Image (cartoon, rainbow, N blue to C red):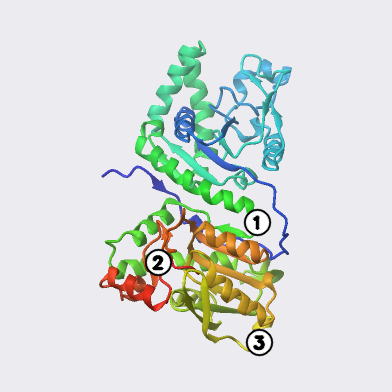
Amino acid sequence: METVIELADDLADDLSLQSASSESTTMPTKQPFVIGVAGGTASGKTTVCNMIISRLRDQRVVLVNQYVYAMLQDSFYHSLTDEKLQNLHDYNFDHPDAFDTELLLSDMEKLKHGQAVSIPDYDFKSHKRKEQSRLINPSDVFILEGILVLHDPLVRDLMSMKIFVDTDSDVRLSRRIQRDTVERGRDIEDVLHQYARFVKPSFEEFILPSKKYADIIIPRGGDNDVAIDLIVQHILTKLGQHDLCKIYSNVDVIVSTFQIRGMHTLIRDVTTTTHDFVFYADRLIRLVVEHGLGHLPFTEKQIITPTGSVYTGVVFCRRLCGISIIRSGESMENALRACCKGIKIGKILIHREGNSGRQLIYQKLPADISSRHVLLLDPILASGNSAVKAISLILSKGVPESNIIFLNLIAAPQGIHAICKRFPKIKIVTSEIDSSIDEHACVIPGMGEFGDRYFGTDNDSSTALKSQRSSGFPCLGTPK
């Protein structure tokens, strides 16, 4: 089957350097989910955006046209002076300097903080902004479209998802010729001259290099129905996660690419072998651990490189320890040791009593845990009952709430609510938020009994499920 979506580089491997600031217990302002759609001229960006919007039926989506095409309805183009108008054929509309990026950033920051904005209405006949502007109200989702939306790092930082529409250059040129000659009444020789002088060089210098920043690359643009469907389903999943992240500022879902989603597909598949399950689970766990380490406090440090140059870097907090909730949490210990050589790791065993009761069976914690930052390890957060019990124990040892980072692969909304309402200063880092938990307190859709699948004790999954529930030991999906 032909690949419908190409993946960008491993963006999720990048560690974000974030200081551990104190968390507010008040609800943060809801922020929009911003989708950036870039690509060359006439690549089909607008078609892709319209298809996404039409399939997000129940979502309130506003399309912000930064640059729809390089020379059509580009709201943030600079108005041309009389001098530039006299030499219009020498003006490059595909260069980053042609756009008022500062104004775009200002407007997007206002929208991000729930403020309405009036964006310019650009007239392509006069090449000036009209007196009237267009009012854009705050929304849950914005699609920011244009040839250069992935070029500027400050604009990229505003995006929750970055898409690049990749269409063959010959197809794009033929579309541009048809559009400019039929819709704009231009001479074909002028179209080809401008393409060769400005459009193609700008594409190669500015637009094509920005492709590497995309989370998702769509070959063939709007003709790729399968890719659009996958993206829409992915957006709907992320919107559900995004709502919780807007409610709780201490919840961090790592940036998802289709590579990460592909690994989730493999470890969730009931037919996946134990060997493959462990391999891909370890890869995801490593990503979660590395992302969680990015939330540790750090200080700046200047060092001398082998070339004799001065480099200003950072040094992370070194007083760490890991605490795994037996037994699924033990599957995350190798990744933590690989990232933090020599780290101390403690263990907690909690026994399930009924639907909500929890009994502490065993604990082995570092004696000096109160002076350390704690990475709490458990692959699954379901109802949150066991996690609450474990966190309460750690706090009783004198660990400040803000010094605890809870790392897991998937979480259910119920577990997130249970922890965040009771411990608003604890950081939760996960790779995906699932829809719910079922009557057995198992995460849905989940991935089965994580401990049994990881440690190879799931030869008879139905028997194992009954066995663990009767014994009271947690499975993947039982309340943590």
| Viewer-nearest of discs 2 and 1 | 1
Disc 2 residue crowd, few under 14, some 14–19, many 20+, Cα 10 Å: many
Task: Please identify the quarter of the rendering in which residue 76 is found.
Answer: top right
Residue type marked 1: Ser
- Please give the label number shown on residue 249: 1
Q: Residue furthest bottom?
A: 367
Residue 182 is situated, as x and y percent measured from the top left of the image, at 46, 12
Mark 3 vs mark 2, CA separation in Å: 31 Å
Dot 1 falls on a residue whose secondary structure is loop
Residue type marked 3: Asp
Question: Dots 3 and 2: beta carbons under 8 Å?
Answer: no
Q: Mark 2 or 1 closer to N-term? A: 1
Task: Please identify the quarter of the rendering in which residue 394 is found.
Answer: bottom right
Residue type marked 2: Ala
Mark 2 vs mark 1, CA separation in Å: 26 Å
Q: Mark 3 or 2 closer to N-term? A: 2
* Above or below, 470 relative to 43: below
Residue 408 is situated, as x and y percent measured from the top left of the image, at 50, 66
Residue at mark 2:
281
* Residue in the image at 66% along x and 22% along y: 121
- Between 113 and 294, the residue placed more toward the observer is 113
